[in-house]
Amino acid sequence: MNILKIKFDNTFYLFLLLILLTGNFKEFTFIFILLFFHELGHAIMGILLKWDLVNITFYPYGGVCLFKTLENRSINKEIIILISGPIVQIITYCILNNIFSYDYIRNYHLSILIFNLLPILSLDGGKLLNLFLNKIFNYLTSFYISIFISFITIILLILFCLFNYHNFNLFLISIFLLFKIIKSIKDLKYYYHKFLVERYLYNFKFNKIKVSKDIYSFYKECNHYIEFCDEKEYLNKYFRKNN
């Protein structure tokens, strides 16, 4: 049974303190409502698709739904879960816009929507980009391309903020996202190992078959042949050799 657990990262409280000091609490309330229902959209769709929801954690740049699921999860299901967030946010905005007459609600809604779809790995846009790349490239190549695009986008955001001094909040969020990207690079070894271990332990029935030159060129949703061995046989040799 999935129970909705809400967490707040320490950086979220620092950002909230900054909002209180600048006297923008009412505006922040509407922003948080939009963010909350955005993440709720991800959570509800994930639960409907039988994913085990761990919690929703809020950061200065938005929220993150954490699911307990396999690294070899369905690409299409993950895409559906990701687009459910913006859809629920749009519905929430339409309701708020009919109740309140504040012009800035529309501005905040569009800002959150557009920002969240930027090609940065910690955001929905970056995750969607990586998933579409997974349909074309192998796991690691997709990740490296996504990281490269994320870095370019972050640098452009930071440069924009440096030349527009009134965007201090966006500057702080950009720096925070930069550290998140660096962390994801450090975590890559763990997640790829998890990706391989799952393939060793479970019998995935993928329709596509690819011939791979080595263990670092495995695709999502594909079975592989490598060095005249099927995937299971090769992984068995690989883990025996490295244990």
Image (spheres, rainbow, N blue to C red):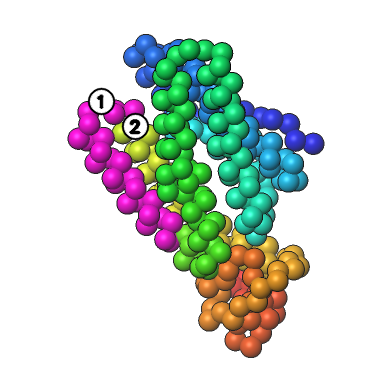
Can you identify the residue that label 2 sits on? 170
Q: Can residue 236 be seen here?
A: no
Q: Residue at x 66, y 73 (%)?
A: 208
Proximity of marks 2 and 1: CB atoms separated by less than 8 Å: no
What is the secondary structure assignment of the residue under circle 2?
A: helix
| Amino acid found under the numbered disc labelled 2 | Leu
Residue 30 vertical position relative to residue 241 in the rendered view, above or below: above
| Amino acid found under the numbered disc labelled 1 | His
Q: Between residue 97 and residue 60, name the one nearer to us.
A: 97
Q: Residue at x 58, y 44 (%)?
A: 82
Residue 73 vertical position relative to residue 173 in the rendered view, above or below: below
Q: Can residue 119 be seen here?
A: yes
Q: Residues within 10 Å of mark 1 (few under 14, many from 20)?
A: few
Tell me which corner region of the image, top left, top right, bottom left or bottom right, holds residue 115: top left
* Quarter of the C terminus within the rendering: bottom right
Q: Would residue 76 be found to the left or right of residue 107 on screen?
A: right
Residue 14, image x and y in percent? 41, 23
* Magenta range: 144-170
Q: Residue furthest bottom?
A: 228
Q: Name the magenta segment's main secondary structure.
A: helix
What is the secondary structure assignment of the residue under circle 1?
A: loop
Q: Would residue 169 be found to the left or right of residue 234 on screen?
A: left
Q: Residue furthest front?
A: 98
Residue 33 vertical position relative to residue 241 in the rendered view, above or below: above
Based on the picture, tell me whether residue 169 belongs to the magenta stretch: yes
Residue 111, image x and y in percent? 41, 31
Can you identify the residue that label 1 sits on? 166
Q: Residue at x 47, y 59 (%)?
A: 143
Q: Residue furthest left?
A: 163
